[in-house]
Image (cartoon, rainbow, N blue to C red):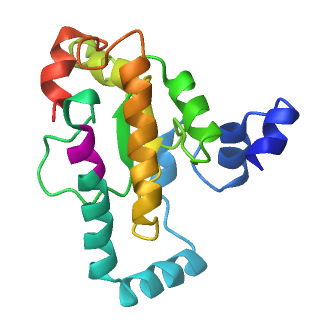
Amino acid sequence: LATACRCLSVDLDRLVNGSVRGFARQDLLAQIRRRPCAPLLALLARRLRRFDGRRLEARAIAARQVLERLGEKALFPGAAAGDHTHWVLPVYAPQPQQLIKRLREAGFDCTQGQSLCVVSAPPGRPDLEPYDARETMAGVVFLPCYPEMSGAERERLIHTLAEYFEQSAETVCRQTPHPSVRAKVAV
């Protein structure tokens, strides 16, 4: 699919995100306040009954391996927070489209995502505007890192990321959107 999209000049992220059910960015709070339909509740109940804590822990371990191996070479927003399950593994890149291109060429499915967004400040409260979060999210790339990914594939991902950050003209550890962001998202 990625190759076909590239050949047809179609944005893979836009295609995938447009084909899944989600919420429009407008009036998000009003949309999520609605009662879920019966099939969605049934799916939720099934997922809760079949929850596998071992898979959750395996996912966290896989992500920690990537984080530890890359260390100071890469900046992982939120890495300093406690108790991660790593349902996504974000990495900050000063030039995210270049990183996405390199990872996709290496066969990894990564994205900048469109389902996570920064919520603007309420009207009349410009002092609460999340400037740092908005600029950080503009550089975030979500990486594939899940328990079913083999150790060899994880190593290849780590190698591809390390190579990118080492060869990048701008070093992630030295350039972030705002000076305050480095302290907030540092490993």
- Drawn side of residue 19 relative to residue 35, left or right: right
Kindly identify the residue that appears in the image at 57 percent across and 31 percent down.
Answer: 102
Question: Can you give x and y, in whole percent of width and height, for residue 181 in the image?
Answer: 21, 19
Say if residue 29 shows up in the picture. Answer: no
How far across and how far down the image is residue 109, in percent?
58, 48
Image point 36% across, 35% down: which residue? 91
Query: Horizontally, is 87 left or right of 25 in the view?
Result: left
Quadrant of the rendered image containing residue 106: top right
Vertical arrangement, residue 28 with respect to residue 118, above or below: below
Q: Confirm whether the magenta stretch covers residue 68.
A: yes
* Whether residue 12 can be seen here: yes
Report the predominant secondary structure element of the magenta stretch: helix
Residue drawn at (27%, 34%), measured in percent from left and top?
Answer: 77
Query: Up-down: is 95 above or below 63?
Result: above
Q: Nearer the viewer, residue 43 or 63?
A: 63
Residue 108 shown in magenta: no
Please tell me which residue lies in front, 178 or 97. Answer: 97
Q: Which image quadrant for residue 65?
A: bottom left
Q: Is residue 165 above or below residue 51?
A: above
Provide residue 121's location: percent of width, then percent of height: 31, 23
Q: Which residues are magenta?
A: 66-70
Residue occupying the point 22% across, 39% down: 78
Lateral position of residue 41 relative to residue 83, left or right? right
Q: How many marks?
A: 0
Seen in the picture, residue 121 relative to 78 is either above or below; the reply is above
The residue sitting at the bottom extreme is 49
